[in-house]
Amino acid sequence: MKKACLAVALLLMTMAAQLAPAAAQQSSVLDLGTLLPDAITRSSREPMRCLTAEAHFDPCAFHTQQGIRYVVAWDQSTFRVVYLFTTDAGFRTGSKVGVGGQMRITRSRLVPFKSWQIDPRSASAGWFPVIVPLDQPAIVGEQDDTNALVIGFVRTVYLNERALAR
């Protein structure tokens, strides 16, 4: 009986040791400027090229992390992450805003980025909501505040403070 308990304990410790690196890797979150994990470059034989700013393309791949699917783009020469984007309904910001949710925005503060519109005041931890205004103003310039639908979130080195200052 004692040998059986010892064998089970040894088996459980071995399994825990094998699972620990995977769990640690899963909990690490990709961030701008971090070195691209080898798992991403190995998983895509031929990386796609994504439009990551106006007239600018970077190599990119889909990557699922902690159950959320992202588009991850990197600088071709440094392999550092320069762009993250998600439309995954499971993604939530620190302020609990998610894809498919609505938010109140001010039209005059919207910033064009690629073919999208973002509201820089609504960013949470560097994640900018990509939005579609839902209401048309009755009189142009009269009704600046409106509701918007969140269709995704973007985090990128190409949105700098000067571009966002409006």
Image (spheres, rainbow, N blue to C red):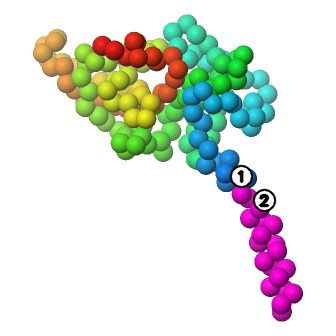
Contact between labelled residues 2 and 1, with CB atoms less than 8 Å apart: yes
- Residue 165 seen in render: yes
Q: Secondary structure at mark 2?
A: helix
Total numbered badges shown on the rendered structure: 2
Identify the image quadrant of residue 123. Answer: top left
- The quarter of the image holding the N terminus is bottom right
- Say if 55 sits above or below 29 in the image: above
Task: Locate residue 81 relative to residue 138 in the image: left or right.
Answer: right
Residue 8 among magenta residues: yes
- Say if 139 sits above or below 22 in the image: above
List x then y, in percent, for residue 160.
45, 16
Residue that badge 2 annotates = 18
Q: Nearer the viewer, residue 35 or 145?
A: 35
State the residue at coordinates (69%, 30%). Answer: 36
Q: Secondary structure at mark 1?
A: helix
Magenta stretch: give its range. Answer: 1-20
- Residue 132 seen in render: no
Label of residue 79 in the image: none
Instruction: Farthest residue to the right: give it.
Output: 3
For the residue marked with disc 1, what is the amino acid?
Ala
Instruction: Farthest residue to the top: give it.
Output: 55
Instruction: Farthest residue to the bottom: give it.
Output: 1
Task: Locate residue 140 relative to residue 128 in the image: left or right.
Answer: left
Magenta segment's dominant SS is: helix
Mark 2 surroundings within 10 Å by alpha-carbon count, few (fewer than 14), some (14 through 19), many (20 or more)? few
List x then y, in percent, for residue 120.
35, 24
State the residue at coordinates (71%, 35%). Answer: 37
Identify the image quadrant of residue 139. Answer: top left
Identify the image quadrant of residue 165. Answer: top left
List x then y, in percent, for residue 2.
83, 90
Residue that badge 1 annotates = 22
For the residue marked with disc 2, what is the amino acid?
Gln
